[in-house]
Image (cartoon, rainbow, N blue to C red):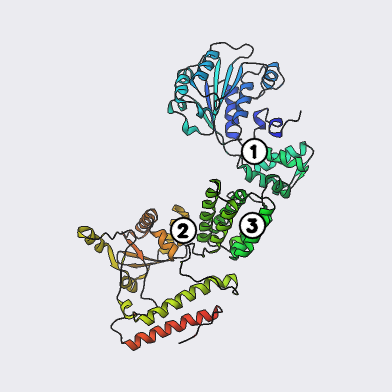
Amino acid sequence: MYQVLYRKWRPKTFADVVGQPHVTETLKNELVSGRIAHAYLFTGSRGTGKTTCAKIFSKAVNCLHPVDGNPCGECEICRGIDDESIMDVTEMDAASNRKIEDIRDLLEEIRYTPAQAKYRVFIVDEVHMLTTEAFNALLKTLEEPPSYVIFILATTEPHKLPATILSRCQRFDFHRVTPKAICGRLKYIAQQEGGDIDDEAGLMIARLADGGMRDALSILDQAMGKSKLVNALTVCETVGMAGTGYINELAGDIAKRDPAALMRLINELYANSKDMIRLCDELIGYFRSIMILCTVKDSDGLIVASEAELTELKQAASNFTPARAIEILNVLQSSYEKMARGVNKRVEMETALIKICGIPDNGTQPAKSVQPVIQHSSPDQNAIINSLLSRVESLERTVRSGLLQSRSSAQAVPIYGSTSEPGGKAAQESNASSVNVREISDSAKIYPEWSRVIEALQEINQAAYSVLANSRGFINGKYLLIETGGFGRDMLRNSQVKDAIKNIVKQISGLDCRLGPYTPSAAIQYNSSESNSSSEDATLAYAKKIISRAQEAGVDVEEN
């Protein structure tokens, strides 16, 4: 009968365990020195070797001829444990045997001494599933078991265990296996099975397995059923992925904001029976890599990709800003959750991609008043054209209504973090915390230490740094005014970001500052003391400037 790869290639010694040297070396040293504890707790994500190490340990502690802490695998005890003919090693699944009656049956067995081996070893898998009553029944015996009994508890969720249980066990945390280690092990096993797997396919399986060796071997087993020579295309066909080619094409159309091309690709993938949830997951992984490349200088170890894939990712990252990448991830994550709840997956995927096409480079959703994209314009010009049209329309409305002079009065703008509650004392406090930002901005000077502030912010809050990296700081007395876009202003309303900047400024300059937006009177001074003619001249100059920019972008604007 055929035996699946993850069972056939389950490690027989500690040396065969992949990616857990901190666990295996410690266990071997304890066995060699004879410092064997009465209870162990193995924790970690699925498929990282918890149960495997428990079985190796149960053999090693009873082996008649151990070799440097490892079981020999040849003696009658080792062979008996492997073929389950020796009953002194008991494995119990707490997910299906979780009641107090099951633990009482287990405690009843503990009363009997080993029949053939030196120790009776009880391996309790998924121990976090036990009921509170079952834990209480196990507690006293776990603390002081008979000298011939060893408990090994395994769980993926150690936080669900009572503190009284945790305090009575020697704990070992199993790490996720690195992609490089998974890829190497897959290549070795594939060759032993008469096949081969290339590096790109190995890294693809490693990404899908998410650090679990068992999951990786299951995918390899299935892929080798299709072909002995496993490549990236074989893996994609095996697990139903869209694949690197489709993902790169989708990302390119997202960068160009081309919804028509995206809809055609989704239709093609849907016709090929590709799972939309998995496609969304692939896009999330892709744009996570884009976000990292946009915000982190040294991305080594953060992205699982071959050299060729990494080169393509770096080239693609130049088409996105950090803010836009973050907003794209937010839309995809939301859609993934909706699809998991059972909505129409294809429609949700298409809706998400159309939303993504509308996200500008500053990361914020476009205003509802923006006109639809002009059909004959190139995708790169669409955002510029729409912005210019909106500004021209706004200016025309202002001129017609004769409100230019009313805009000349400076507005009181709250400093970041202030409140504006009306009435009584609250209103007085609000007025006290609001200042004439335009007047302060006009007389403010460039803050020379702002670059140092941004560098220090990078160490504390990477997200804030990526958004504020190109901002400028201005100082006027106790006010530190920051010149940044809409997304940056939203970021500065976050209390953690504000406090971080204030603390950095205090350390650098010794200034206990208040933060505010840098809002100068702009290129045109709308001053109520000026004559109507001078105001109109300024307005015309401003209008001509906008018209000039619109014409550069290919938009015909009529002057009246």
Give the numbered dot on residue 97.
Answer: none
| Residue at (70, 22) in percent of width and height | 73
Q: Answer with left or right where residue 285 lies relative to residue 243.
A: left
Determine whether the residue tagged by mark 1 lies in a helix, strand or loop: helix
Q: Residues within 10 Å of mark 3 (few under 14, many from 20)?
A: many
Asked if one can make out residue 203 in the rendered structure from this viewpoint, the answer is no
Residue carrying label 1: 215
> Image quarter for residue 5?
top right
User: Picture coordinates of residue 67 (x, y %)?
Assistant: 67, 23
Q: Nearer the viewer, residue 2 or 49?
A: 2
Residue that label 2 marks? 465
Most extreme residue toward the front is 344
Identify the amino acid type marked 3: Ile
Q: Residues within 10 Å of mark 1 (few under 14, many from 20)?
A: some
SS at mark 2? helix
Where in the figure is residue 540, as x and y percent of width and height?
A: 41, 85
Q: Amino acid at mark 2?
A: Tyr
Please identify, in this view, whether the residue under mark 2 or under mark 1 is nearer the observer. Answer: 1
Looking at the rendered structure, the kind of residue marked 1 is: Asp
Q: Position of residue 52 (x, y in %)?
A: 63, 29
For residue 266, the mark is 3
Do residues under tags 2 and 1 come within 8 Å of each other at their CB atoms?
no
The residue at the far right in this view is 194
> Upstream in the sequence, badge 2 or badge 3?
3
Question: Crowding at label 2, few (<14), some or many (≥20) Cα neighbours within 10 Å?
Answer: many
Q: Are marks 3 and 1 in contact (CB under 8 Å)?
A: no
| Measured Cα–Cα span from mark 2 to mark 1 | 37 Å
Point 34% across, 67% down: residue: 475
